[in-house]
Image (tube, grey):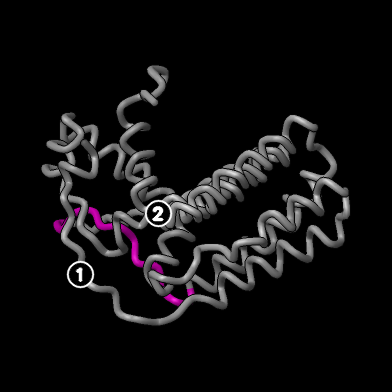
């Protein structure tokens, strides 16, 4: 699908780098060289610099004077703090979704669950990771609180980054049935169960994190952003 012409080059570049992080194609700590990115995206280094500044404000990129930009490397404490924040936010998200979701919204959630299932059947781990994060972002949008939605748009890519850093590459990004159970409880308007399932789900994902060294990855910048 071609990108929306209404979006600026800077926004599109930032989105594509974010997607690469969410899909585990860009690991934590990798240097984001402006010259290489400019060649890959076929834009000026100025636009790359602006996109990296946007991502730095969102916490996905760290800028170092005289060294350049790097994909952020969240600490173990950052990981714990992020999940604590998500538990606070997503309990409210669930309540808001139950109060506001239309039949069309519920169909969107079901369609997204189907995409997740198809990605699992195809053993496409990158797609599963991305779709898992997007599920939570979709819930936040349906919930209708634009401030929470904005936060979730920032926290979900950071969560993928943390999973990339601390999780086993062979561990599922999200347990297979937990999203569908949350959606089923939402459809029943069972707020207590849906909230409990969401909190258990986030705790489950956090509990899967492990402290292990990250192998150095060679990045083919031209192929990644071709």
Question: Can you give x and y, in whole percent of width and height, for residue 56 in the image?
Answer: 36, 50
Residue topped by disc 1 = 216
Front residue (pair 217, 158): 217
Tell me if residue 19 is in the magenta stretch: no
Point out the image quarter for the C terminus: top left
Which quarter of the rendered picture does the N terminus lie within? top left
Task: Name the residue: 38% across, 65% down.
Answer: 164
Relative to residue 105, is residue 75 drawn left or right?
left
Quarter occupied by residue 19: top left
Which of the labelled discs sits on residue 126, or is there none?
2
Q: Residue furthest front?
A: 121
**With 62 as the anchor, is 76 left or right in this view?**
right
N-term mark: 2 or 1: 2
* Percent of width and height locating residue 172: 50, 66
Q: Position of residue 209 (x, y in %)?
A: 48, 76
| Numbered disc in front, either 2 or 1 | 2
Look at the image and give the residue range highlighted in magenta. Answer: 66-77
Badges 2 and 1: C-beta atoms under 8 Å apart? no
- 191 in relation to 211, above or below: above
Q: CA distance from mark 2 to mark 1?
A: 18 Å
User: Under tag 2, what secondary structure?
Assistant: helix
Residue in the image at 16% along x and 30% along y:
42
């Amino acid at each position: 699908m071609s990108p929306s012409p209404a979006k600026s080059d800077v926004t599109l570049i930032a989105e594509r780098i974010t997607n690469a992080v969410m899909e585990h194609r860009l690991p934590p700590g990798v240097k984001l060289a402006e010259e290489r990115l400019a060649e890959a995206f076929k834009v000026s280094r100025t636009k790359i610099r602006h996109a990296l500044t946007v991502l730095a404000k969102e916490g996905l990129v760290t800028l170092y004077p005289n060294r350049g930009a790097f994909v952020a490397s969240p600490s173990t404490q950052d990981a714990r703090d992020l999940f604590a924040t998500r538990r606070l936010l997503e309990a409210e998200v669930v309540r808001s979704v139950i109060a506001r979701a239309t039949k069309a919204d519920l169909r969107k959630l079901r369609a997204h669950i189907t995409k997740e299932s198809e990605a699992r059947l195809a053993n496409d781990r990158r797609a599963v990771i991305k779709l898992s994060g997007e599920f939570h972002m979709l819930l936040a949008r349906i919930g209708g609180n634009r401030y929470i939605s904005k936060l979730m748009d920032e926290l979900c890519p950071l969560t993928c980054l943390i999973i990339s850093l601390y999780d086993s590459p062979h561990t599922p990004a999200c347990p297979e049935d937990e999203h569908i159970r949350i959606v089923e409880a939402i459809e029943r308007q069972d707020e207590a169960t849906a909230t409990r399932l969401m909190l258990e789900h986030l705790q489950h994902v956090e509990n899967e994190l492990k402290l292990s060294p990250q192998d150095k990855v060679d990045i083919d910048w031209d192929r990644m952003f071709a």
